[in-house]
Amino acid sequence: MSTPARVLVLNSGSSSVKYQLLDMNGGERLATGLVERIGESTSRIAHSPSHGARREHTERIDDHSAALRAAAAELARDGLGLDSPELVAIGHRVVHGGLRFTEPTLIDDKVIAEIERLVPVAPLHNPANLLGIRQARELRPDLPQVAVFDTAFHTTMPEYAARYAIDRATADEHRVRRYGFHGTSHAYVSRKAAELLGRPYEDTNVIVLHLGNGASASAVAGGRCVDTSMGLTPLEGLVMGTRSGDIDPAVVFHLARVAGMEVDAIDELLNKKSGLVGLCGDNDMREIRRRIDEGDDEARLAFDIYTHRLRKYIGAYLAVLGRVDAVVFTAGVGENAAEVREAAVAGLDGLGLAVDPSRNAVRGGGPRLVSPDGARVAVAVIPTDEELEIAQQTFALAGAGESGSEGAHESRREGGRESGRQSAVEGHA
Ligand code: ADP
């Protein structure tokens, strides 16, 4: 029997804290939970132990400190208390690591100060992530705590993919460049794709399509990200639930000059009222498909715009990578919406891409191929698991990674240029 080793993964948002406790000897999820509407009188705590019934209740939770104590109390009820010696580390999701953080990082006061320095580029996320980090350190100051950054996987992008073609001096002064997000998911899924294909990760080229409410594509060559669709903020790239993705930047000037809109209103329009919801009023792909089946033209057009953009990115990344072993769909839409997968590769047979209708129609399950046997490029569905990835990276870095963890691995890359202050709009990735 290997020594019990647990890792707590925390994802702190501005008004919510999501947590998962994982057993690193095999990666079993011992409990998952969510504290939401923090600061309101009707905060909700939902807790699901793996061995036992789900519990949910409403009570006033004033702040992140109280949220973490509430989560700890729920875990303690299942005999999984945070004071247990089996808890070996805490992993935190941190949205923006700029260029400074290219890999998971052990948290100390200096790291906290660096994450703080990146607040101007991630005004919604990094402050909330920091609240979680500070509270967790108060709760267990003795434990190693690790920050795992959404941007880190993308720091390997070559300069010609990361830089916008704008005036260099202005870009450098304000650190305007493409950072990319959802990196933890892109890293996890691209590695799993190599496993599914039975190929060494270092020799596998993958296009990952992370299609959740936020959506991003990445081109991964031998385990290194070489391009991704999100940029300075998560607004760039694919059509998303509520975000426009790529548009002519002059749309912003036009709306300011001709429609007289303020910058904040345009920010809100493009981040919250665009994408699928802007096009047809719904951002849930299930609802959009239901409406299409009833003959709704607005929903049909929204779907076609969404999948046309996907096809364009697949084509672009085929060209970026030259040789592609797999196109992989993941996250809520990517894992569940067979129609999206089919439409995204429709007409690309000439490029070696196709789905097998009966394989594509299979619902649920783990990593699987949906392309026909013998296809030049595999098309796969791989459920993402950002929490497991964060737990594994945390465990590996906390110095416990050698003791029998099934999936513990080092995920390190080189880099480490300095990032600094910048001002930018930001949404939630
Ligand atoms: P996020 O983590 O970005 O909030 P998820 O990865 O959970 O998002 O994806 C949420 C989206 O997945 C929903 O908005 C919905 O459009 C889509 N989705 C979830 N289940 C299904 C399903 N069974 N069929 C089609 N789409 C689905």
Image (cartoon, helix red, strand yellow):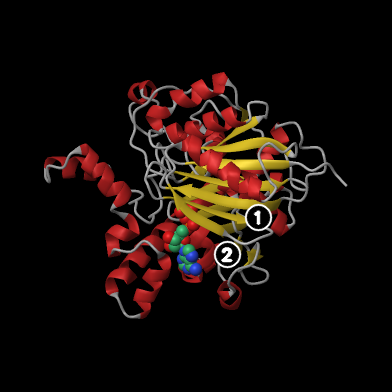
Q: What residue sits right under mark 1 in the picture?
A: 193
Q: Where does the image place residue 13, in percent across and percent down from the top left?
A: 45, 41
What residue type is disc 1 on? Ala
Q: What residue sits right under mark 2 in the picture?
A: 352
Front residue of 46 and 244: 46
**Quadrant assignment, res 427:** top left
Q: Given the current orientation, which residue lies at the most extreme right position?
A: 1
Secondary structure of the residue carrying tag 2 is loop
Characterize the local packing of mark 1: few (<14), some (14-19) or many (20 or more) Cα atoms within 10 angstroms: many
Characterize the local packing of mark 2: few (<14), some (14-19) or many (20 or more) Cα atoms within 10 angstroms: some
Secondary structure of the residue carrying tag 1 is helix
Give me the residue at 68% from left, 41% from top: 7
Front residue of 344 and 1: 1
Q: Where does the image place residue 219, in percent across and percent down from the top left?
A: 54, 47
Residue 211 visible in the picture? no
- Compared across the picture, whether 86 is left or right of 122 comes to right
- Compared across the picture, whether 123 is left or right of 26 comes to left
Sequence order check, earlier mark of 1 and 2: 1
Q: State whether residue 8 is above or below residue 121.
A: below
Give me the residue at 37% from left, 26% from top: 422
The C terminus: image quadrant: top left
Q: State whether residue 255 is above or below residue 274.
A: above
